[in-house]
Amino acid sequence: MKHLSKLAGLFLLAFLVSCGGKEEKKEKDGFQYDRTKKTESSTSSDSNDIVLVSDDLMKFNKAEIKVKAGKKVKLTLKHIGKLDKKIMGHNFVLLAEGVDLVDFATEAATARDNEYIPENSSDVIAHTKLIGGGETDVIEFDAPAPGVYEFICSFPGHYGLMQGKFIVE
């Protein structure tokens, strides 16, 4: 029995080692999908154009987004998955400074009729609509004051994996 558990442990270790260390990149619909990429800065000094990609595995392709203060932000959310928004819907919600992420997500989970955005919430700076596989939504908003903000997907249960930092410089 001891040998069997050691053998199982070796197989598990070999599996874990074989899964790590590779950079995962995919080209889909003209977007480079790179889960290892941490930041996306605007492409020029006059532009805050951001493309954020989501999928059926509850992932955003970026964990950090940097924009310039005092400029308009154009954010495109693209869902490259296949599942319907009722099953695997995603949105982008930029939270105001100091908002407790877990408290907000808990409240948002009860706002199904409003696409998981609490009504009349001062906790939200900007948000996209809820989209499903193959859909895209584009929003424009003014960059908030310089600082570090959090963004999430507010679909119930998604915020644990689908969150990141929105840095205004």
Image (spheres, rainbow, N blue to C red):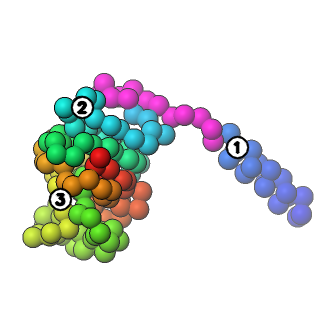
Give the residue type that dot 3 points to: Ile
- The mark closer to the camera, 2 or 3, is 2
Q: Position of residue 123 (x, y in %)?
A: 20, 68
Of 97 and 126, nearer the camera is: 97
Residue 117 part of the magenta segment: no
Q: Which residues are magenta?
A: 20-32
Q: CA distance from mark 3 to mark 1?
A: 41 Å
For disc 3, the marked residue is 125
Q: Residue at x 41, y 62 (%)?
A: 160
Seen in the picture, residue 126 relative to 120 is either above or below; the reply is above
Label 3 Cα neighbours within 10 Å, binned few <14 / some 14-19 / many ≥20: some
Residue 152: in sight, yes or no? no
- The mark closer to the camera, 3 or 1, is 3
Q: Which mark is residue 45?
A: 2
Seen in the picture, residue 27 relative to 140 is either above or below; the reply is above
Secondary structure beneath dot 1 equals helix
Q: Position of residue 63 (x, y in %)?
A: 40, 48
Label 2 Cα neighbours within 10 Å, binned few <14 / some 14-19 / many ≥20: few
Q: Which mark is residue 146?
A: none
Residue 25: in sight, yes or no? yes
Q: Residue at x 16, y 45 (%)?
A: 70
Q: Residue at x 68, y 47 (%)?
A: 16
For disc 1, the marked residue is 17
Label 1 Cα neighbours within 10 Å, binned few <14 / some 14-19 / many ≥20: few
Of 32 and 42, nearer the camera is: 42
Of 57 and 68, nearer the camera is: 68
- The mark closer to the camera, 2 or 1, is 2
Quarter occupied by the N terminus:
bottom right
